Image (cartoon, rainbow, N blue to C red):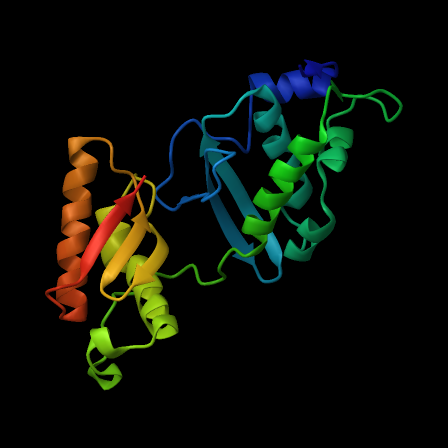
């Protein structure tokens, strides 16, 4: 059981700055199973210009993300290589000698270490162009796996998909098996299912491959 002891932590929990109450259209979904989170990051050359999160967080998760944002915004992305939960906890203290949180475990450190590593790989390209599959590549079905993955990722980050999934968590590639494409995507409501059907149709059209099959993974 986590005990929140510092006033600084309590204030951030009551009025979060980095954790948002709405899902931004530019947010990407974290693929891990131990933290249901979406994130938005803006690059400023080598630095993190902006960072925001959305998700179903408990108090500890929300405070860790708030501290992470405060410690990373305006600093080099490489800073995250050495960032730890213990440092985030220290940031939340009122005084250096007094713990802000009691009850931190190794499992919390491991969970956020994976999340930090995911943020570390954030793509630099923030411009989204319309996707066109080049005829120079030959038929999509004949591409090597690494080439299929590259093309599918480019398609999923294109302006067509960004516009389609406006204000909804963006699709992310999970795997490609021949002509079957597994995509992590919202797929609970009728609206989300309709969006995915449109995604499938756009993919078939873009790659000119009628047997291309997109499979949702929520």
Residue 69 appears in the picture as rendered: no
Point out the residue furthest to the left here: 210
Q: Position of residue 53 (x, y in %)?
A: 49, 36
Residue 211, visible in the rendered structure? yes
Q: Could you say which is closer to the camera, residue 110 or residue 83?
A: 110
Give the image location of residue 111, x and y in percent: 61, 37
Quick check: 112 above or below 9?
below
Q: Residue furthest front?
A: 177
- In the picture, measured across the screen, residue 150 lies left or right of residue 81, that is left
Q: Is residue 4 left or right of residue 196?
A: right
Check the image and report above or below for 152 versus 116: below
Does residue 11 sit above or below 41 in this rendering?
A: above
Answer left or right for 81 relative to 197. right
Q: Quadrant of residue 104?
A: top right
**x 35%, y 62%: residue:** 153
Q: Looking at this view, name the residue that lies furthest to the right.
A: 97
User: Who's the residue at 38% across and 46% down the image?
Assistant: 26
State which quarter of the image contains the N terminus.
Answer: top right
Q: Quadrant of the C terminus?
A: top left
């Amino acid at each position: 059981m986590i005990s929140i002891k510092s006033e600084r932590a309590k204030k951030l929990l009551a009025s979060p700055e980095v954790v948002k109450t709405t899902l931004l259209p530019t947010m990407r979904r974290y693929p891990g199973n131990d933290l249901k989170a979406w994130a938005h990051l803006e690059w400023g050359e080598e630095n993190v210009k902006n960072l925001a999160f959305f998700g179903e967080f408990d108090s500890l998760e929300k405070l860790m993300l708030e501290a992470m944002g405060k410690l990373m915004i305006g600093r080099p992305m490489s800073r995250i290589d050495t960032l730890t939960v213990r440092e985030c906890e220290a940031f939340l203290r009122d005084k250096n000698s007094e713990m802000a949180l009691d009850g931190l475990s190794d499992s919390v450190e491991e969970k956020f270490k994976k999340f930090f590593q995911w943020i570390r790989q954030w793509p630099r390209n923030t411009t989204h162009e319309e996707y066109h599959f080049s005829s120079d590549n030959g038929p999509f079905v004949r591409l090597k796996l690494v080439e299929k993955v590259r093309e599918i990722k480019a398609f999923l980050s294109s302006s067509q998909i960004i516009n389609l999934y406006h204000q909804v968590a963006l699709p992310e590639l999970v795997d490609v098996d021949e002509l079957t494409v597994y995509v992590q995507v919202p797929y609970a409501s009728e609206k989300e299912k309709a969006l995915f059907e449109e995604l499938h149709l756009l993919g078939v059209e873009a790659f000119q491959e009628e047997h291309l099959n997109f499979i949702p993974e929520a």
